[in-house]
Image (cartoon, rainbow, N blue to C red):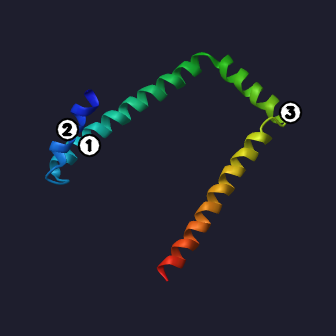
Amino acid sequence: MLLGAISVFFWYWLRQGFNRKVIKLAVPLVGLYLVINGIVIGSGLWYLHGHPTLVARWWETVQQQVEANAYVPWLGMAGQRWSSWAWLWYHNFHLGSAVSN
């Protein structure tokens, strides 16, 4: 219900096009979003500053995984996803150019 009400509000607001009213609404919303993100990130950093053992334990775990080569399967999976995306893009590009000729 809430999402529907918000959608109707934005439809009513934007039905006349993207104008100054939309900018006047968007600027404070983006500013609020950035302030909230700053508060969340800042409080997380403040917490880590107060508990340095958490960072030290995390770094030790990362080093142990790097020494044990535990990161290699993850990199392999990422490379596989990248190559499949590149393959799809390549073939769509050539199909698109073949159709347009």
Amino acid at pointer 1: Val
Q: Secondary structure at mark 1?
A: helix
Report how far apart the C-alphas of labels 2 and 3 lie in the structure: 55 Å
Instruction: Tell me residue 60's x, y (percent).
Output: 77, 25
* Residue identified by numbered label 3: 68
Instruction: Tell me residue 88's x, y (percent).
Output: 61, 61
* Residue identified by numbered label 2: 8
Q: Secondary structure at mark 2?
A: helix
Which residue is at 69% across, 47% downward? 78
Instruction: Tell me residue 80's x, y (percent).
Output: 71, 51
Report how far apart the C-alphas of labels 3 and 1 lie in the structure: 48 Å
Amino acid at pointer 3: Ala
User: Which residue is nearer to you in this view: 36 or 21?
Assistant: 21
Q: How many marks?
A: 3
What number is the disc on residue 57? none
Instruction: Describe residue 8's horizontal placement relative to residue 100 as left or right.
Output: left
